[in-house]
Image: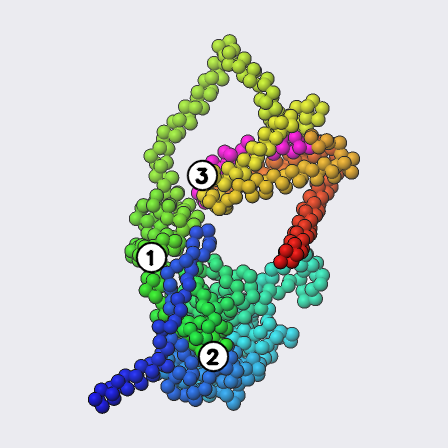
Amino acid sequence: MIKGMTFGLSIAILSSTLYVAVSDISYGINMETSTSGPNGELVPSQEAYSPERKIALADLESGDNDAMLNPEDMYFDKENNIIYVADTGNNRALKIDVSDNSYVSFGKDSMNKPTGIFATDKRIYIACKGNQTLDIYDKDTLAVINTMSRPDSALFGTETPYVPSKVVASDKGDIYLVSEGCTKGILQFDEGGEFVGFVGANATSGSVSTWIQNLLGIGNTTGFLTAGAAPTNVCLDANGLVYTITQNSTSKTIKKLNTNGVSILSPSYNRSGTIQASVDDSDNIYSVQDTGSITIYDSYGNLLFTFVSNKDDEVLGSLAQPMAVQVGKDKSIYVLDKEYGMITKFAPTSFASLVYKAEDYYKDGLYLEGENSWKEVLKANSMFILAYQALAKASMKKGEYQLALEQFKKAEDKKGYSDAYWEIRNVWLQQYAGWLIIAIFSLVMAFILVKVLYKKKPLAFAGIVNLKNNVESAPVIRDAVHMKMFNFHVQDGVYETKFHHKGTILFAIILFVWFVALQILSVYLKGYLFNDQNVYNSNALQIILISTLPFLGLIISNYFVATVTDGEGKLKDCFICFVYSITPYLIWALPIFLLSRVLTYNESVIYNALMIVVYVWCGINVFLAIEELHDYGFWKTVWNIILTVFALCMFVLFCIVIYMLGYQLYNYIANIIKEATD
């Protein structure tokens, strides 16, 4: 009986110890996970990570049994399974051995607000914001071996802020230091601690007015260029390449730099508020956001997973104020939380492990070897868009070009789609090119033969000629034939419209309707490679409004401007001549749309050149039409166009103001009515 009680008590004590040290995952939360889907939108995905344990000092078996206070950075030594933490609030650093659940603290006597920490094989680098120094410790003895203060270098300058906040170092000894508020980029030092220069500066993203001021040197005493946002963090990959993080950036929050400090990669899905990032041995990028989100990208910057944690200190996996993220050998994720004063470990699920395995095959170019893995991914999640891209590469290797074409389209990879279509078209041309040439040659010869016969025996074609004349005499056809004058003789066409009433308002309306129809048809008839709009997400009403309102606005604005600048054109003539002036677009847009369906990216210059010719042609026609319509000279026409565009902008601005005032008035009246009825 006593032995049984002793055994039961031992089991209870052991269970309690394991609960404290490892943090039982039974009360962890399900991580709502998303991945990249069609049209760049997030779609739900199987859970990629689950919380496994928490690491808090009070839970460890040896140490001072005190707590972290507002820690702001950490580094995970994967080889030795040790976590180094900048325990900012306690003015010290921690060395936590995850294997035996022990830790030691160091630097408490000399540190002042350490906010960044990094370790190499022999050294530990700690950025002390309070001391404004970078302290270097021996990794074995945990003793200070060097302290780097503000660089005494003309290259660094006297006005550049030196407030060390984050640090990383390569195996070669190069040191990269983030100085808080330094817009010139990351500070780079050599192995001896000598300042080398700045890398990874962010470009400015100012307004047009700011750009003009910078160009003229107005309002900018530091030079012609305005600096971008200061980088807020930095990390390294296994090859020693630098990644910069800019927390408040609205685009390119994470940037990968080459050896020359030039950005060569930025994740396709930007997450603002990114605090820190970490890169694994496969160059996958793991980042954590201030909202408690964890976002993972592959080595090409494609989004793999993103999941959000709730703020609840009673639940394993919750994050209140994440400050750092590190990735382990098994792709487990460690996140340091400043508010909770602890580290949470997230372990990859079987689905995430499957994706990582397949992604490694893809990264190494082993498309056929990874095909089965990607198929398994699609079985679990049919909207995992990266799987289609990998399978398309495998299909290309197997010569299954039609299947690859469909897969590239699902993956929204237009470059791959173009390559697959080129192969399909090449096969078709090999089979039918001869017949195509014969057909074209036959048509040309038939046309020549008809012309020769017509010259020799015109009476034989008398019936056809009469029919042609009767058709051309019809009012609608006569108006259509009038379009020919606006192709090469615009001024004659305008003259005929003003004084001989050629080109009716009814036919101009028909042409305008065709112009609107072309805007809608472009969505459905353009080739996939040249179509920036999605067929399924396109709004016909929105397309109609965007195509009609600016065009009609230009016509009306031009008429009113002309009335105060001695213009002679009537509003009806303005409408007719403006519509007729875009005849090249009305005639050639549809054939060009259809042509784009048989072109690849290699022939994109053909499509782009044709569209540019049509647009320039229409622009010249409109200019000449305005000149003749209002009886202007060249420079007066230019001035009229400038005033027309200005009047249109003012009208649009007026409409926006009226809309905003009307909306506020509506809300005000609605609130009064609501209060009166409550």
| Closer-to-camera residue (329/336) | 336
Segment colored magenta: 574-602
Of the image marks 3 and 1, the number of the one nearer the N terminus: 1
Could you tell me the amino acid type at mark 1? Answer: Ala
The residue lying at 59 percent from left, 22 percent from top is 476
Could you tell me the amino acid type at mark 3? Answer: Arg
Tell me: 430 left or right of 156. Answer: left
Front: mark 3 or 2:
2
Secondary structure mostly seen in the magenta stretch: helix
User: Is mark 3 in CB contact (under 8 Å) with mark 1?
Assistant: no
What residue is shown with label 1? 380
What residue is shown with label 3? 597
Task: Say which quadrant the C terminus sits in.
Answer: bottom right
What residue is shown with label 2? 341
**Where does the image place residue 444, in percent across and percent down from the top left?**
45, 24
**Where does the image place residue 387, in percent across and percent down from the top left?**
36, 55
Could you tell me the amino acid type at mark 2? Answer: Gly
Kindly report the distance in space between the C-alpha atoms of the residues bearing marks 3 and 1. Answer: 34 Å
Kindly report the distance in space between the C-alpha atoms of the residues bearing marks 2 and 1. Answer: 37 Å
- For mark 2, give the secondary structure: loop
Position above or below: 182 against 108: above
Of the image marks 2 and 1, the number of the one nearer the N terminus: 2
**Where does the image place residue 302, in percent across and percent down from the top left?**
43, 58
- For mark 1, give the secondary structure: helix
